Image (tube, rainbow, N blue to C red):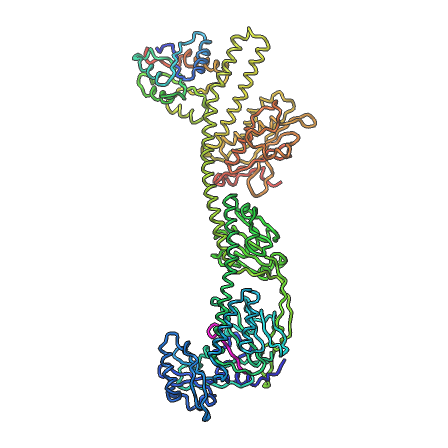
Amino acid sequence: MYANKILLAEDDTTDAEFFQRALSRLESPPELIWCKSGTEAYQGLTQHSDPATLPRLAILDIKMPGMNGLELLEKIKSDERTKNMPVIIMSSSDEPQDISRAYDCGANGYLVKPNRFQDLRDLVGSIHHFWIKTNRLKPVHD
Amino acid sequence: MHLQNDPVANSVREVYPYRVDLENCENEPLRHIRVVQSFACLIAVDSDTLIVRHVSENTDRFLGLHWEEIIDRPLSSIFNRDLTEQLSIGLGRENGFESLNPIQTLFTVNGQQLLKNVIVHREGNRLLLEIENSADDFRTSGYQQILARAVARIQNINNHNRLFTETAAILRQLTGYDRVMVYRFDKNYNGEVIAESLNKDKNLEPFHGLFYPHTDIPKQARELYLKNRVRLISDITVPPSNIRSSPQAEEKYLDLSMAGSRGVSPIHLEYLGYMGVNNSLSVAIILGDKLWGLFALHHYSPKTVDYGLRNLLLFLGQIFSGHLSMQAAGSYREKTLTRNLVRLALGEHISKTRDIFTGLTEGSYTLMNIFAETSGAAISFEGRVETMGETPPTDAIQKLTNWVTNNGVDHDSLIYTSDSIGKEYKPFQSYCDYAAGVLIIYLNPDHADWICWFRPGLSRKITWGGKPEKELIVSEQGTRRLGPRRSFERYVETVDGCSAPWDQGEIDTAYTLRITIINSMIQHYSEVKQTNERLKKAYEDLETFSYTVSHDLRAPLRAINGYAEILEEEYGQRMDDEARTLIGGIQRGVDQMNTFITDILELSRVGTGGLKLSPVDVSPLANEIVAELRPLYARTPDLEIRVVKDLPPVVADRRLLRQLYTNLVSNALKYMEPTEDGRFAVEIGCRPPTGSGPLVYTVSNSGSGIEEEYLETIFQMFSRLSSNSQTEGTGVGLAIVERITSRHNGKVWVTNDGLGVTFNFYLSPENANDYVTSGKDWPFLKPA
């Protein structure tokens, strides 16, 4: 079983804070692991020798200094230990080529950052409901 | 009609090898005439053997020998040893006999020892010897002084206007002729008497200012003047002497080009006879390689002109030609200098203003200054035509240049001139007052760009020395022929439709101006090219910039918006109404900014990426958009949005076409105004097809129409019709529409018709025809 944690790779403090706030409004919110860069996130993820301790979901921003979200995504999806972890790309870009590149790199979902906090709250609720509460993803091993 | 009655002329005709009259006088073989004038006898010998092969019948008068005693005999048996030695000297010299002539020799005639001039010319393998009397009063030493004085006087004439008159006077003094004329040819070889000196005692009618038609001195006669510059016709009343040829002569007709005593054409004899002239002496004035004119000397009674005097006149003619060409060169230089200054100024002005039109038509020097007597000028460059001064209408000028391209010039020629364009190109007859002359330079080989100048028509009065017509002459035997004109009554002709001629200097300047302009334009073009490249780069940068900025702007906006919302949610209870209103203000500002960013992003997207073209069914697309937008206006009462059924498909990038329609429809909804009965209406349709050109699609809304001044600017970025901030919108929407249509090689424009205001557009992307599915029957395209 994956841990009840969500990893957020986001260099923008405000966006991270909003995400945290939106998440905290949920009933029994999962723990948020916030990494300020792709490199930090990747280091954190590869420390887990046991998949059960991996976050249940990773949400990655695209534009980050150093390793960007898509590069991080590729690394996650090419690593045996992490490749089953669902990854959602969350970006302010709604460019079709960004979206299709994300899916090409193996993203499980693509979300455009909403402009309104209310919308973000709704979105985070849906993510939680879809990816975590309904537990659609089978754990790697029991 | 006149009876032929000139016995001398007739006698020449009898021995002439060809029939000669005015109909064929242009071809009259003057040099093959078989007579010599009576003032000399002629002997032609083989230059190798020195045996006589041709001889004139009048030898006994000059040599005391009958011609039969001479023909087929060696020269040594006829002439003394001294003369034959001189001949062998001349034969050995490179310049032949020029410096030996005349060889003065004593001959015994009727027992008397007489001094004769022997003049020798070499013509191929023939030596021509002319023997004529040497004038008793002619002393070379005396004439040398006269000559020196005459040369000095001619060279001291500084005033161009007096050059001709004074030279004529000098020549008359020198020769004692009754009339000395300076006769100048125009380009058609009509002659004009430009100066004259007359014997005051003879009460002669002045010919000064008269014109003589070119037929008076036909082409082959003019050509002979280039070879043999002095021509004496000594006494037209004395019959000439026939030339006898040996049966062993190689040639049938002896070439008499160089012979001073060459017989005179019967036509010319008749001509002089009608004029009352007994003796004429002409000296060629040659400028460059061309016959510029003649000194024409007339005497009304017989007159002997010694060979030495003729030689002197030849020399004076050369001095005069030299003086004339020096003066001409001086004035050419001066004019060329002036024109070159103007040319350089024009080139500089083009470079400075970077515009061919401004460069050539404005400033202190313009096209009107470069050539004298310009009435108007026109420039055609890259499809634009500008005129200055007085010119025919632009379309007439364009037709003229086309005509010139097709008829007037050979294709490689880049210049055309005419001083009577109306005669060559009839439509220009009516512009003759100010455009009788034209000079065109073509800037490029395809003749698309040109510059032309016009010159006004000069109504010229030409006073002919007699009606320039031929007359029918019937001989006593009843044969008919055309004779020379007999009437020398003045005849005034007015010639319209001619301008001052374009001289060679002006044509040369036109050529160099053409190069100057092209060079200035090349400089200009390379600058434009650089600017274009910089612009292109800047444009690309701008697109990258607006894309980046739009994305990066969103983050702080989300922050502002998010904090405002959180503030309202978490502290709303504790805030009073005013505080909550203020927070609402923040959020509205953020919303507006978001719309801005979205629009700018859309705009930058239109410019990038390739078009994915396909035929798009317009009606279903429009219906989709209406379905999306309609809910926003759910509360507008009596709103009717109509999409015309079965609009023909258009080849377009589907995504962009959708954007285009979204923007046009939301624009229509935003700005619609109620009709008189209070209803709102928007219609998506198209204009009736015109048969040619792409179909025009329309989006129309009810409203009072857009003011004229905004019709153009409405599609510019950030332009909004209403200054009323109540109306939403960023002013980018229509700019996007404009970008989308232009990316599809199309156009969008607005008209105040249809429901009130109508936006029209068409798209015609490259290769659109590849997509059109033929055979499909679009009800809309059926004729009504």
Q: Residue furthest bottom?
A: B111
- The stretch of residues the image draws in magenta is B225-235
Task: Classify residue B84 by image quadrant.
Answer: bottom left
The reply to whether residue B480 is visible in this rendering is no
Is residue A37 placed above or below B330 in the rendered structure?
above
| Nearer to me, B507 or B161 | B161
Residue name at image x 40 percent, y 88 percent:
B78
Q: Number of callouts in the render? A: 0
The reply to whether residue B161 is visible in this rendering is yes
Image quadrant where one finds the N terminus of chain A: top left
**Residue B13 lies within the magenta run:** no
Residue A90 image point, x, y percent = 43, 19
Image quadrant where one finds the C terminus of chain A: top left
Residue B340 image point, x, y percent = 50, 53
Task: Classify residue B703 by image quadrant.
Answer: top right
Q: Residue furthest top?
A: B574
Q: Residue furthest right?
A: B676
| Nearer to me, B542 or B584 | B542
Residue B123 image point, x, y percent = 41, 78
Is residue B576 placed above or below B599 in the rendered structure?
above
Residue name at image x 62 percent, y 79 percent:
B202
Task: Classify residue B8 by image quadrant.
Answer: bottom right
Q: Is residue B468 left or right of residue A89?
A: right
Is residue B431 placed above or below A76 in the rendered structure?
below
Residue B359 image point, x, y percent = 53, 46
| Nearer to me, B221 or B680 | B221
Q: Is residue B57 left or right of residue B643?
A: left
| Nearer to me, B635 or B38 | B38
Q: Is residue B250 left or right of residue B416?
A: left
